[in-house]
């Protein structure tokens, strides 16, 4: 009779392709939420620099502080869900906070609201700054608070016998995260590149932030729409408190009975047996073993998140990561893992993570080598109290230039030198073509780069031009002399 009831429950359970219908609402919600987050984040540094007119250092510091807060608040979200509201109510509550934060940030970027004199610059920059900070704090609370809940809530929708479907769901869930990230980091910078404004046309940050805000509102609506289909597990208390107390008691007990007259125990956590259940102690041991695998993760994310938003437009560079993930997740899940299984290799989840981390470490080594090579090509600009001169010979013969600081340079016809460093004093030169020489003086030329053009066509001439380049051009642009 029990078996018949079980089979009937499987037959009449609402589902699609063997999956609970409720998970489709969760996947769509996650796609929209990740679109909202990564779309907003893609243009955030540029918004700080070119709308709020912050320096590079301040923009970078605030950006990484915001990202750090987004990864700190999941602890708060997990405590609320496990101890008070449950996953469903926590997701709803913090999603509302999240949506409000996105809306506030979008409003803060509307220049016309505070541009009374219509000159294209906010009359009081403090108002957009204050609104931006409030919006970012609310977003950090929202996105971080729901982060530990949504995936776990999706896992709750499956029965014990649906292990295969649950595993495939997490792959689809991860794919939806990166699909949302990919599409948003392509579209949002394009929206930012548009010009909008009532009085003065400028980069359209309201649209770039407004679309992610709208997607977050859609994510909230979709999640609520599936409410009647969800399996909602009631909060059962936060296990972290019990784990902490168990570990503390084991350490205390171990030192209390450290004398040799007490027999040793197999594991130091076994000293908590007098007070805590054997199952809890066993589970903590398993967690402690897994934690060693997570030791490299802080370093990984510290390196990974240095790729903040860099024509692709500069803020679209980070699309490469989700593109590769969207391609590789199906390939690995459908082709690679089944092939490894056919080779009778026991490729457990822990081994998958280990191989993935080793490949990630190799990728960072490659990135470091590439960056070193790039750094070697970067120009060295004049230091304080110096200027630089590059000599270009436009003449038909080789030339020799003598400078008043004792230096000299030989330049072939139609050739040039590298940039030469000089102290900021008046410049005197002698230009020699064969047996002919001219002398020329130039007044103090300032702490910049210059080009000295020389020629012997018709007669020997020398002209000093100011390049006007004192730093590497921003946003990947080039400067033409």
Image: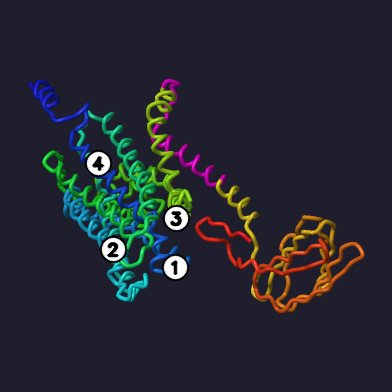
- In the picture, the disc for residue 308 is 3
Circle 4 is placed at which residue position?
Answer: 28
Looking at the image, tell me whether mark 3 or mark 1 is earlier in sequence order: 1
- Note whether residue 193 is visible: yes
**Cα gap from disc 3 to disc 4, whole angstroms:** 26 Å
**Cα gap from disc 2 to disc 1, whole angstroms:** 18 Å
Q: Residue at x 32, y 45 (%)?
A: 284
- Residue 135 rendering spot, x and y as whole percentages: 28, 63
Dot 4: element: helix
The reply to whether the magenta stretch includes residue 361 is: yes
**Cα gap from disc 3 to disc 2, whole angstroms:** 19 Å
- In the picture, the disc for residue 135 is 2
Q: Residues within 10 Å of mark 3 (few under 14, many from 20)?
A: some
- Residue 116 rendering spot, x and y as whole percentages: 30, 75
Q: Residue at x 44, y 51 (%)?
A: 301
| Nearer-the-camera pick, 84 or 394 | 394
Determine whether 424 is above or below 344 in the image: below
Looking at the image, tell me whether mark 2 or mark 1 is earlier in sequence order: 1
Dot 1: element: helix
Determine whether 318 is above or below 118 in the image: above
| Nearer-the-camera pick, 347 or 267 | 347
- Note whether residue 78 is visible: no
- Residue 350 rendering spot, x and y as whole percentages: 40, 37
Q: Residue furthest left?
A: 1
Dot 2: element: helix
Q: Residues within 10 Å of mark 2 (few under 14, many from 20)?
A: many
Q: Quadrant of the C terminus?
A: bottom right
Circle 1 is placed at which residue position?
Answer: 58
**Taking 314 as reference, is 206 left or right?**
left
Q: The magenta stretch spans which residues? A: 342-366
Looking at the image, tell me whether mark 3 or mark 4 is earlier in sequence order: 4
Determine whether 20 is above or below 344 in the image: below
């Amino acid at each position: 009779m029990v078996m018949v009831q079980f089979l009937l429950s499987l037959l009449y359970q609402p589902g699609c392709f063997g999956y609970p219908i409720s998970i489709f609402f969760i996947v769509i919600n996650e796609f929209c939420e990740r679109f909202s987050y990564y779309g907003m984040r893609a243009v955030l540094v540029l918004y700080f620099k070119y709308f709020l007119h912050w320096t590079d250092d301040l923009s970078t510091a605030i950006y990484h502080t915001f990202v750090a807060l987004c990864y700190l608040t999941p602890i708060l979200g997990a405590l609320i869900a496990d101890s008070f509201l449950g996953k469903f109510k926590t997701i709803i509550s913090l999603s509302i906070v999240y949506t409000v934060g996105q809306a506030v940030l979008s409003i803060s970027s509307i220049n016309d609201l505070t541009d009374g004199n219509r000159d294209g610059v906010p009359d009081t920059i403090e108002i957009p700054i204050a609104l931006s900070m409030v919006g970012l704090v609310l977003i950090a609370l929202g996105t971080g608070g729901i982060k530990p809940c949504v995936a776990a809530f999706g896992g709750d929708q499956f029965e014990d016998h649906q292990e295969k479907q649950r595993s495939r769901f997490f792959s689809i869930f991860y794919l939806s995260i990166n699909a949302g990230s990919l599409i948003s980091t392509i579209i949002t910078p394009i929206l930012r590149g548009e010009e909008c404004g009532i009085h003065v046309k400028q980069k359209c940050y309201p649209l770039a932030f407004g679309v992610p805000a709208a997607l977050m509102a859609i994510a909230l609506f979709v999640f609520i729409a599936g409410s009647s289909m969800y399996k909602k597990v009631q909060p059962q208390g936060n296990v972290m408190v019990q784990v902490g107390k168990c570990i503390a008691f084991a350490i205390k007990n171990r030192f209390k009975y450290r004398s040799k007259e007490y027999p040793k125990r197999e594991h130091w956590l076994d000293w908590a047996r007098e007070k805590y259940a054997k199952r809890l102690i066993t589970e903590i041991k398993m967690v402690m073993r897994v934690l060693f695998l997570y030791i490299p993760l802080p370093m990984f994310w510290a390196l990974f998140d240095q790729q903040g938003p860099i024509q692709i437009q500069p803020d679209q560079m980070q699309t490469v990561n989700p593109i590769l993930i969207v391609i590789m997740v199906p390939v690995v899940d459908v082709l690679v893992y089944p092939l490894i299984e056919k080779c009778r290799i026991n490729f457990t989840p822990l081994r998958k993570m280990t191989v993935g981390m080793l490949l990630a470490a190799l990728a960072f080594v490659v990135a470091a080598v590439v960056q070193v090579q790039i750094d070697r090509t970067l120009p060295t600009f004049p230091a304080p109290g110096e200027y630089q001169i590059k000599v270009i010979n436009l003449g038909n013969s080789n030339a020799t230039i003598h400078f008043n600081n004792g230096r000299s340079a030989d330049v072939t016809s139609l050739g040039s030198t590298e940039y030469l460093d000089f102290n900021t004093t008046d410049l005197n030169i002698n230009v020699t073509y064969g047996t002919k020489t001219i002398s020329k003086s130039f007044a103090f030329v300032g702490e910049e780069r210059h080009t000295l053009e020389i020629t012997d066509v018709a007669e020997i001439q020398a002209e000093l031009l100011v390049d006007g380049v004192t730093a590497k051009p921003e946003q990947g642009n080039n400067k033409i002399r």
